C-alpha cells in the first residue's frame, strides 16, 4: 500500500454484497459496511459475524491485521483482523475487501472495525510495516501498541539483501539470532552494530530505516506489552494463520466466500476438539507441586503444557537472593552453567507480586520459570490470582456478553436483539459441548432440546408478547457511509417478530444436528477402541500360543 490504488471486483462485488445482505437478514448481529455507495460494491467492504464479535469480547486484547492477499499476485484484495483464543488457536475478528488503497480508506476501515467491536480498542495490534496502516492505527487506535510483523521484515530483508545472502550464507542465521535471542537492549544494540560492521552494511538505507523503527518490531523493545503469543517463534511466522490454506493466489471473488466459510467451520471444529480434549483428557503431572495441579484444573490443555514446561525448568534454575529490603527482595535466577544469561526477579512478599526482567508474563500472559523459581524459594504453593489470565483458562468464555449500546436506551428496551441472540447462542454452544460428553448426557440433552423446540413453537404461534414492540438496538449489519453514525431499528410488525422466533428455532434445530454429529463421532471412536482391543487380544492370544509351542 505504498501509494493510492483502485481495484475492482467486477460482477463478483455484487455477489459479495448480496451475500452480506443475506447474512444480516438471517442474523441481525452480523455486521457489514460499505465505504461510499452502499448499493454498489465499488468501495471498501468490511464485515464481521456474530461469533467473531463475541470472541473479540473474550480475546480482543491482541489483534493481527493481515493484508497479505491484497498484493498484485493475489486476485482478491482480502484483509483480515484475527487474534488467538484460549487454546492459542487463530480466531477471527472481521474481514475486508480493500478496493481503494489510500490513507483515508484505511482510516475508514479501522474506524468501522472499532465501531463493530463496541469501540473497545485492543492492547496491541500487529501488521505489515505499511505506511497507510501506520497512519490509520495512530489515528484510530492511539493507545494501542503497534508492532510490525517480524516475518515480513525478514522476508523483505531477503529481497533487499539478496546479493548478501548468496555471498554469505551464514548472515541469515546471525541476523535472526541478533533479533530473536538478545535479552537486553544494550546486547541488541551491540550485536546489530557488530553485524553491520562485519558485513560492510553501515551505509545500507533499508537496514537503517528498519533500525530507526526497531522499537516496533525487535522483541527486546516490545516485551512490556501483551501480544497473546505463547512462544517466541510465533512472531516469526506470517499474519495469515486463519486463512492459510483457504485463500491463495488462485482464489477468485466468486469462490472466496465459500473458502471464508470453510475456514470458519474448520477452526470452529478445531476449537471444539480442543475444548473436548481439555475437559476429558487429564494431563500427566510431572511434579508433586500443588501449583501444577492447580494450573492443570485452571488452564486449557495447550496453555497448561506451556506452564508445565516453565514449572519443570525451575528445577534447573535456582533462585539466589541478592538484595533484601524488608518486604521486597531481589533474586538472581540462572540455569546451571549459564550465569551470563541470568534474570533478576523482584518479589513483594506483602502483595505477593513478582516482576522478572524477561517480562514473559507481560508479553504472553504466562508466568515464567524465573518467577516460579522465586515462588519455589519462598514456598508459595499456589499461583496468586493476579498471575492467572482468564483469557488462557478453561472458563475464558464464561459470563454474559453485554451490548454496550443498550445502556443508552430506556430500561424496557435494554434487552436488545443482539444481546438475546448472543446469549442464546453462547448457552446453546455450552449445551452442545456438555451433551457430547457421554451417550447418557447426550440423550438427556436431546430430550431437553426437543422440549425447548416445542415451547418455542407454542410461543411463535401465539404471536408477540406485550413488551415485544419496543425499540431495539441494531448492533449488527447496518450499511455505513464513511461518516454515518450508529442507527437504531424498530421492529414493530408481527411478521418480523415471527421471523426472529423462526430464526431462534432454526438455531435450536441446528444444535440438534450438531449433537447428532458429535454422537456419531463418539460412537465411531468407541467402535474403533473396541476393534483395537479385539486386535490386541488376538495378538496376545497368538503370542501365548507361540510360547507354548
Image (cartoon, helix red, strand yellow):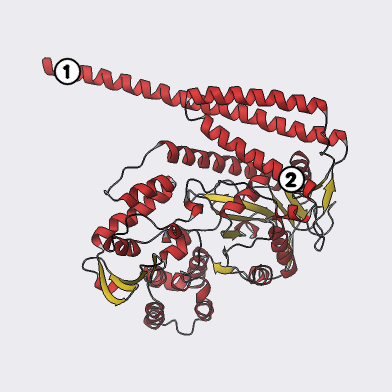
Kindly identify the residue that appears in the image at 32 percent across and 50 percent down. Answer: 290
Kindly identify the residue that appears in the image at 54 percent across and 22 percent down. Answer: 443
Q: Is residue 536 above or below residue 343?
A: above
| Residue in the foreground of this view, choosing between 400 and 120 | 400
Q: CA distance from mark 2 to mark 1?
A: 69 Å
The quarter of the picture where residue 358 lies is: bottom left
- Secondary structure under tag 2 reads loop
Counting from the top left corner in percent of width and height, residue 485 is at 81, 60
- Mark found first going from the N terminus, 2 or 1: 2
Counting from the top left corner in percent of width and height, residue 196 is at 41, 81
Image quarter hosting the N terminus:
bottom right
Tell me whether the residue at label 2 lies in contact with that at label 1, contact meaning CB atoms closer than 8 angstroms: no
Q: Is residue 516 visible?
A: no
Counting from the top left corner in percent of width and height, residue 342 is at 29, 71
The quarter of the picture where residue 341 lies is: bottom left
Crowding at dot 1, Cα within 10 Å, few <14 / some 14-19 / many 20+, comes out as: few
Q: Which residue is mark 1?
A: 544
Q: Is residue 522 left or right of residue 48?
A: left
Counting from the top left corner in percent of width and height, residue 174 is at 37, 71
Q: Which residue is mark 2?
A: 415
- Secondary structure under tag 1 reads helix
Amino acid at each position: 500500500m505504498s501509494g493510492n490504488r483502485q481495484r475492482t471486483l467486477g460482477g463478483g462485488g455484487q455477489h459479495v454484497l448480496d451475500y452480506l445482505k443475506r447474512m444480516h437478514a438471517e442474523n441481525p448481529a452480523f455486521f457489514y459496511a460499505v465505504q461510499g455507495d452502499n448499493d454498489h460494491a465499488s468501495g471498501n467492504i468490511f464485515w464481521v459475524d456474530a461469533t467473531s464479535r463475541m470472541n473479540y469480547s473474550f480475546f480482543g486484547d491482541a489483534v493481527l491485521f493481515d493484508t497479505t492477499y491484497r498484493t498484485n499476485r493475489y486476485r482478491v484484495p482480502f484483509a483480515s483482523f484475527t487474534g488467538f483464543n484460549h487454546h492459542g488457536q487463530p480466531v477471527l475478528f472481521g474481514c475486508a475487501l480493500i478496493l481503494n488503497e489510500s490513507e483515508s480508506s484505511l482510516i475508514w476501515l479501522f474506524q468501522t472495525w472499532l465501531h463493530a467491536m463496541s469501540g473497545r480498542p485492543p492492547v496491541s495490534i500487529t501488521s505489515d510495516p505499511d505506511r497507510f496502516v501506520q497512519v490509520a492505527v495512530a489515528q484510530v487506535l492511539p493507545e494501542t501498541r503497534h508492532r510490525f510483523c517480524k516475518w515480513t521484515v525478514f522476508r523483505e530483508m531477503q529481497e533487499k539483501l539478496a546479493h548478501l545472502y548468496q555471498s554469505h550464507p551464514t548472515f541469515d542465521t546471525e541476523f535472526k539470532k541478533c533479533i530473536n535471542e538478545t535479552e537486553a537492549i544494550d546486547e541488541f544494540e551491540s550485536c546489530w552494530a557488530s553485524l553491520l560492521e562485519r558485513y560492510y552494511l553501515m551505509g545500507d538505507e533499508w537496514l537503517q530505516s528498519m533500525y530507526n523503527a526497531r522499537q516496533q518490531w525487535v522483541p527486546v523493545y516490545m516485551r512490556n506489552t501483551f501480544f497473546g503469543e505463547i512462544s517466541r517463534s510465533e512472531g516469526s511466522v506470517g499474519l495469515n494463520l486463519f486463512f492459510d490454506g483457504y485463500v491463495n493466489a488462485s482464489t477468485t471473488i466468486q469462490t472466496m466466500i465459500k473458502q471464508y466459510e470453510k475456514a470458519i467451520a474448520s477452526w470452529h471444529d478445531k476449537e471444539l476438539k480442543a475444548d473436548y480434549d481439555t475437559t476429558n483428557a487429564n494431563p500427566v503431572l510431572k511434579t508433586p507441586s500443588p501449583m501444577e495441579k492447580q494450573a492443570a484444573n485452571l488452564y486449557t490443555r495447550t496453555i497448561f503444557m506451556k506452564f508445565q514446561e516453565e514449572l519443570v525448568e525451575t528445577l534447573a534454575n535456582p533462585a539466589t537472593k541478592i538484595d533484601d529490603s524488608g518486604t521486597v527482595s531481589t533474586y538472581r535466577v540462572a540455569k546451571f552453567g549459564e550465569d551470563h544469561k541470568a534474570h533478576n526477579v523482584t518479589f513483594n512478599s506483602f502483595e505477593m507480586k513478582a516482576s522478572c526482567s524477561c517480562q514473559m508474563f507481560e508479553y504472553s500472559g504466562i508466568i515464567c520459570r524465573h518467577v516460579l523459581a522465586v515462588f519455589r524459594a519462598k514456598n508459595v504453593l499456589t499461583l496468586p490470582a493476579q498471575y492467572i489470565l482468564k483469557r488462557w483458562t478453561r472458563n475464558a468464555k464464561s459470563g454474559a456478553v453485554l451490548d454496550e449500546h443498550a445502556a443508552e436506551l430506556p430500561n424496557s428496551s435494554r434487552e436488545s436483539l443482539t444481546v438475546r441472540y448472543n446469549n442464546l447462542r453462547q448457552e446453546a454452544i455450552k449445551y452442545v459441548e456438555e451433551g457430547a460428553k457421554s451417550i447418557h448426557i447426550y440423550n438427556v440433552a436431546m430430550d431437553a432440546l426437543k422440549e425447548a423446540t416445542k415451547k418455542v413453537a407454542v410461543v411463535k404461534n401465539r404471536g408477540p408478547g406485550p413488551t415485544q414492540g419496543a425499540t431495539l438496538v441494531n448492533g449488527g449489519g447496518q450499511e455505513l457511509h464513511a461518516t454515518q453514525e450508529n442507527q437504531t431499528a424498530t421492529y414493530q410488525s408481527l411478521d418480523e417478530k415471527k421471523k426472529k422466533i423462526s430464526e431462534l428455532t432454526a438455531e435450536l434445530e441446528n444444535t440438534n444436528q450438531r449433537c447428532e454429529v458429535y454422537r456419531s463421532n463418539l460412537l465411531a471412536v468407541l467402535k474403533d477402541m473396541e476393534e483395537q482391543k479385539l486386535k490386541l487380544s488376538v495378538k496376545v492370544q497368538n503370542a501365548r500360543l507361540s510360547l507354548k509351542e
